[in-house]
Image (cartoon, rainbow, N blue to C red):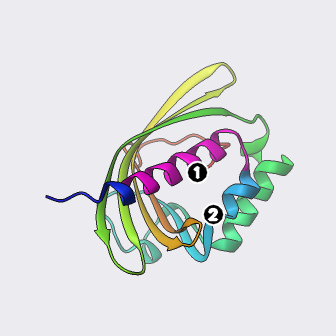
Amino acid sequence: MTINMDLLNKATAFIWYEADLLDHQEYQTWLSLWDTKGLYIVPTDNNETDYENTLNLALDDAGMRRMRVARLESGESVSAGAASSTVRMVSRLRILEETADYIVVRCAMTLNELRHGNLVTYPADLEYRLKPTDDGFMIDRKVVKLMHSDGFLRTVSFIF
């Protein structure tokens, strides 16, 4: 097994940067990380891969991502009424595929949310399809596979 450490380090730095933006609610900068045709996906069934034809907690194209961010920033949605504080821990990054057009990276994430004095943890596997650019990467697809995606998920006031 040969690991391209330079590519892995660059992808790791990019994914950590995205996590930091989300934890600090820098949503406009987060939106700029996305390819215009990119999809943000949170499936209800972690074994499913046909996301466009099945039920998901989120299946956001560029327009839906902008609307999600607008609701979080404006406070117009129920979920944004009491903004959460989050801290993500991202680890175990592994490049699954590398082509001239993109790389696929899988990693583990634990998102800790503090809201109304209650701490809730969301463990997940993440899978990114990243498009290389002159400056780094653009997110072409992000799939968040929550460990308890088939269970009760209360209203969230953050982006996974």
**x%, y% of residue 7?**
38, 60
Q: Is residue 45 visible?
A: no
Taking depth in this image into account, of 5 and 121 the one nearest to the observer is 5
Within-10-Å neighbours for mark 1: few <14, some 14–19, many 20+: some
Q: Where 160 falls versus 50 (above or below)?
A: above
Label 2 sits on what residue type? Leu
**x%, y% of residue 107?**
36, 49
In the image, taking residue 11 as reference, residue 134 lies left or right, namely: right
Q: Main secondary structure of the magenta part?
A: helix
In the image, taking residue 97 as reference, residue 37 lies left or right, namely: right
Please, what secondary structure does the residue beneath circle 2 have?
loop
The structure residue drawn at horizontal position 34% and vertical position 57%, both measured from the top left corner, is: 46
Q: Which mark is residue 33?
A: 2
* Quarter of the view holding residue 90: top left
First to last magenta residue range:
8-26
Taking depth in this image into account, of 44 and 59 the one nearest to the observer is 59
> Of marks 1 and 2, which one's residue comes earlier in the chain?
1
The structure residue drawn at horizontal position 76% and vertical position 43%, both measured from the top left corner, is: 80
Taking depth in this image into account, of 59 and 2 the one nearest to the observer is 2
Label 1 sits on what residue type? Glu
In the image, taking residue 136 as reference, residue 146 lies left or right, namely: left
Please, what secondary structure does the residue beneath circle 1 have?
helix
Q: Where 72 falls versus 131 (above or below)?
A: above
* Quarter of the view holding residue 10: bottom left
The structure residue drawn at horizontal position 73% and vertical position 48%, both measured from the top left corner, is: 26
**Mark 1 in CB contact with mark 2 (< 8 angstroms):** yes
The residue under label 1 is 18
**x%, y% of residue 134?**
57, 72
Give the position of the N terminus as an image quadrant.
Answer: bottom left
